[in-house]
Image: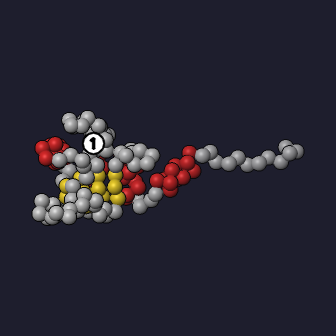
Amino acid sequence: MIIAIDFDGTIVEHRYPEIGREIPFATETLKKLIEEHHQLILWSVREGRLLDEAVEWCRQRGVEFYAVNKDFPEEDTEKNRHYSRKLKADLFIDDRNLGGLPDWGTIYRLIHERKSLAQLLEEEWEADRPAPRKKKKWWF
C-alpha cells in the first residue's frame, strides 16, 4: 500500500517552523509499516531546508521514506512544468482529517487489519459492552 504521511501535527507536534516533539509511537509505527513493505511518502508543506530537517529527523529515528513530496523517488519536479503536488496514494495520514488524528496504535490497526475506523470502533464498543443479563421470570 502507498501511504502518504504529513509531518507537522502527525509525526511531530505542531511547532512549525521548528520540529515539535514526536507524537507517541509515530516513528515506531512507521518503521513497522515499512517492515511490512508499505511504501511511505512524506507529504509535507515544508520545503527546502525545513523539509531537509524533517527528513533527517525521521532518518535519525530509523524512518526512511520511499519518496518525499512526490509519487516516486525518480520523479523530477524541477523539469516537469506540469507538476502537480497531488499524490497517487492509497491512504493519507494527516492531523487535518475529518475527526482529527487517531492515535498511532489505531492507525496501525486500521492499516494492518484493513478495517475502517467505524469497524474498529464497533469492535471496541462491543468488547466494552456488558454481557446481557438473563431475563428473570416474573414469579422468581
In this view, 119 is above or below 140:
below
User: For residue 32, which quarter of the picture?
Assistant: bottom left
- Whether residue 79 is situated above or below residue 94 in the rendered picture: below
Q: Residue at x 23, y 53 (%)?
A: 42
- Residue where numbered disc 1 is placed: 8
Q: Secondary structure at mark 1?
A: loop
> Residue visible at 51% across and 50% down?
121
**Along the line of sight, which residue is nearer the eye, 107 or 69?**
69
Query: Which quarter of the image is occupied by the C terminus?
Result: top right
Up/down of 119 relative to 8, above or below: below
Q: Is residue 118 visible?
A: yes
Q: Position of residue 47 (x, y in %)?
A: 17, 47
Q: Badge 1, how many Cα within 10 Å: few under 14, some, many 20+?
A: many
Position of 128 compared to 12: left or right? right
Q: Which amino acid, by three-letter code, is at mark 1? A: Asp
Residue 56, x across and y down, in percent: 14, 46
Q: Does residue 67 appear to the left or right of 132 in the view shown?
A: left
The answer to whether one can see residue 35 in this image is no
Q: Is residue 129 left or right of residue 99?
A: right
Q: How many tags in the picture?
A: 1
Is residue 69 or residue 60 the one in the foreground? 69
Q: Nearer the viewer, residue 121 or 132?
A: 121
